[in-house]
Amino acid sequence: MNHDEYTTNYIRDILRGVKTIALVGASSNPVRPSYLVMQYLLGKGYEVIPVNPGLAGQMLHGQLVHRSLKDIPKPIDMVDIFRSSDAAGPIVDEALALALKPSVIWMQLTVRDDEAAARAEAAGLKVVMNRCPKMEYGKISGEWTWVGGNSGIVSSRRQQRHENGKMQSLGLGGTSNTR
Amino acid sequence: MADKTPGFDTLAIHAGAAPDPATGARITPIYQTTAYVFDDVKHAADLFALRAFGNIYTRIMNPTQAVLEAKVAALEGGTAALALASGHAAQMLVFHALMQPGDEFVAVRQLYGGSINQFNHSFKSFGWHVVWADAEDMDSIEKALSPKTKAIFIESIANPGGRITDIGAVAKIAKRAGVPLIVDNTLATPFLCKPIEHGANIVVHSLTKFMGGHGNSMGGAIVDGGNFDWSKSGKYPLLSEPNDSYHGMKFHETFGGIAFAIACRVLGLRDLGPSIAPQNAFYILTGMETLSLRMQRHCENALKVAEWLSQNPKVAWVNYAGLPGDAHHALHKKYTPKGAGAVFTFGLKGGYEAGVKVVSSVKLLSHLANVGDTRSLIIHPASTTHSQLTPDQLKKAGATPDVVRLSIGIEDVSDIIADLDQAIG
């Protein structure tokens, strides 16, 4: 498929469908994007499992850090890759070699490897590249508007507060007329 | 709505403006509040450290303002926008994010007189140095570049001359120089021209003019094109280097395509403070819903008035790019094909005195210092908006002593022409 742009429905289906996310390239530095994204996704109710060999065995946002994907003792729905484009291919191959394959490979902003994407798609996975799940969640929920962001989405449906009950937190519920 | 990208008129009404999540209010509420309560200490800390989306304090963001920002960004085809107290505030914050003391930027002389003043005088005291070039002469822009150049600044339709700038040609120069192109799109509005489609990186607006359109509210905006690689450039430390006031966060790395808009908000607006009033954001939002309808009528009326003036024996010349013989007619067809705008100038054979007589004799047109109102407006720039400029600057800005500037409104055009007819005498 074309990975230059994605439809809102494609991204929404992924963000609604996945529950468990392995975040490869997790960081304990609180100003690194991977730290911010992990915290945000946890706040939205996803189970996020950090992967970083340098931090293996430590706790990050209350979650145990694993050395590699194959060390995670449970099935994962999505692999979110916070590494350079050069490093993305081997991570995709590692994901495809898991006994229980994930259903989604997600590569962060600036990360793209079309050949690895093709391998994942051939194995039946969905792929997103050069995007950030925090930003995409924000666009679909409406939080993106709070920073003056252009989501490309218009809707006459009331935006949904997130079920976490927090102040200033929207969910993926009601911004779509196509549900 | 299905995945098809909505059209311009749909965006003008709906972009950013889903029903209010708190109340279900269909029209964007006026959030007349200074601050917002936190869930807990951690939520507060996350907001202050930019780890979470959300409101803290209305000097930096406000839900009514946010809808305005999202709408402006959508109409311009940008990634994000920041709404501010005025167009001048927008320009100040753009350069604050780009410039260090001693840096230069290139601007063309064909600009709003207020911008010329801001660049020549107030910016100088910040150590930001404008180098002037000529919008008619691309070589002059090339020659004005230096290793200290951090940006190029132009207007899409220049005020007051009504000249149309070759945005694509300037964008090529900016790209070769590795600096962002900033376009003031106030007089065109995104209905007539979307500078980002022609290679601009940053768009600024006075929303006070056609965007709000009713002469009732001050506002400005910065639109982030999301199309400049701040990290690769290395010339913009505020965007690419660790920021001390946010614990070492790098804006471009963290915020990607909206990094410039975020930096203008959480650095420029946080520290310099020219925030837009929520009430004004609301008025401008209401005005923007009819942007297309108004701009079509503004342009139709302006063309008819320009045609009438060009036939009047007491009129020496008319500068309106919509007229087939105008020097900027080809650029109008290329960059603003739906109309040449509604602000233009003409000169009377009687010179300065005749110009003063016209502005003193009008009964329907209003003699005042604004443009882009539903009402038709008239002014004599040499004695008002451009009065602080030297004779040479006046000439280069298209505001010679005989010049009368019109901002044609959306009244019945026959009434506008009748008023000008009796005033010209």
Image (cartoon, coloured by chain):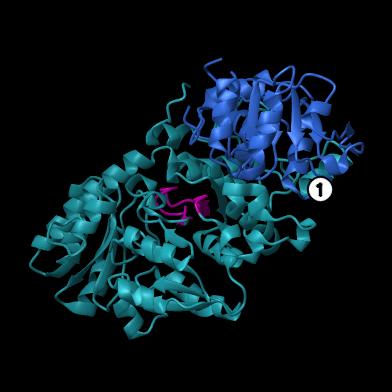
Chain colours: A blue, B cyan
Residue B17 location, quadrant: top right
Q: Residues within 10 Å of mark 1 (few under 14, many from 20)?
A: some
Quadrant into which the C terminus of chain A falls: top right
Residue A121 versus residue B256 in the image, above or below: above
The residue labelled by disc 1 is: A30
Residue segment shown in magenta:
B203-227
Residue A168 makes an appearance in the image: yes
Residue occupying the point 53% across, 27% down: A8
Does the magenta run of residues contain B196? no
Task: Give coordinates of residue B269: x percent, y percent.
Answer: 65, 58
Task: Depth check: give the residue in front, A41 or A20.
Answer: A20
Q: Is residue B303 left or right of residue B5?
A: left
> Which residue type carries mark 1?
Pro
Q: Residue sitting at 66 percent across and 64 percent down? A: B272
Q: Is residue B19 visible?
A: no
- x, y percentage for residue A140? 60, 29
Determine the residue positioned at 80% across, 33% down.
Answer: A68
Residue B209 magenta-highlighted: yes
The percent position of residue B61, horizontal first and vertical second, equals: 66, 48
Instruction: Give the letter of the chain under mark 1.
Output: A
User: Majority secondary structure of the magenta segment?
Assistant: loop
